[in-house]
Amino acid sequence: MAQSRNWFASDGAAARGPFGVHEILALVAAEQLPEDTWVWQPAWQEARPLATVREFHSQHASSEAEEVSPEQEWCDWLDQACDTNELVAMTLQGLVLATNASLGLAYRRHRTGDFVATAAVGLRGAALLGSSASAKDPALTRAKLGPVVLPHANASRAGTACLNRLGELDGSSVALTPLFVGSKLLAVLELGRSDHPFRNGDSSYLRGTARTASDRAGRLALSAAH
């Protein structure tokens, strides 16, 4: 019955139909029918409010249950990465957007032992693509310990090292996020914000993102090994 196109609806001015259940729900979602629309079938003696009809109520509840959370959308997006290079770039882009950072760089270890910027977001970041940083750089050393927000970057050696690369920012706020494959460091993401410091909640977001991206990196590495 739910799949049949034998339903009619009223928008308060005229009857419309016949429709299927999903068609009427789609019209309501698109605001082409009011939420308090009345529906009926030819065999009924009178119309009933949509919300009271079992077929519509069950389908609406099912649609709400299938809604994808922002966290799941983020995981699904990272699952599209073909390799770790793409994963690192996608993670950097996602973090810059989520935290409203002005620019971002992703550093990966080069065969020389130094770290090289392999991905960037923002005009200033793009200009730094291919630049290198020593493995002993204070910012990269600090990042290996875990995600961190440095709201007053020029007050620490790690923050000062970031600013020396990114350029002096109004507000002088930077954030660092490491990505791992198992216990091996995959990349260090470096973010700068020019309008005002990163929010307190950004720290937990960085940690969650690092866990998710590192998990995906591990899967990619395992898949490549086979």
Image (tube, grey):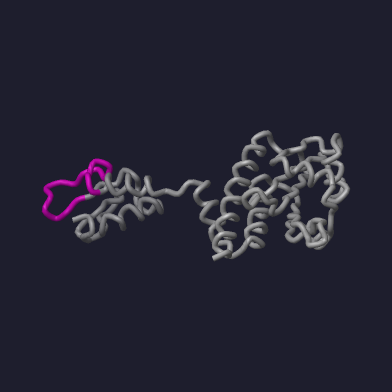
Residue at 30% x, 54% y is 24
Q: Residue 223, position in %: x, y?
A: 54, 63
The answer to which image quadrant residue 77 occupies is: bottom right
Q: Is residue 71 above or below residue 87?
A: above
Q: Nearer the viewer, residue 49 or 5?
A: 5
Which residues are the magenta region? 40-55
Q: Is residue 178 left or right of residue 127?
A: left
Residue at 35% x, 47% y is 34
Q: Nearer the viewer, residue 29 or 16?
A: 29
Q: Is residue 176 above or below residue 114?
A: above
Q: Residue 89, position in %: x, y?
A: 67, 59
Q: Is residue 20 left or right of residue 108?
A: left
Q: Quadrant of the N terminus?
A: bottom left
Q: Quadrant of the C terminus?
A: bottom right
- Number of labelled discs? 0
Residue at 83% x, 46% y is 162
Residue at 27% x, 55% y is 21
Q: Residue 81, position in %: x, y?
A: 58, 62
The magenta stretch spans residue 50:
yes
Q: Residue 7, position in %: x, y?
A: 22, 56
The magenta stretch spans residue 216:
no
Q: Is residue 152 above or below residue 89?
A: above
Q: Is residue 36 above or below residue 216?
A: above
Q: Nearer the viewer, residue 101 or 149?
A: 149
Q: Is residue 64 left or right of residue 19?
A: right
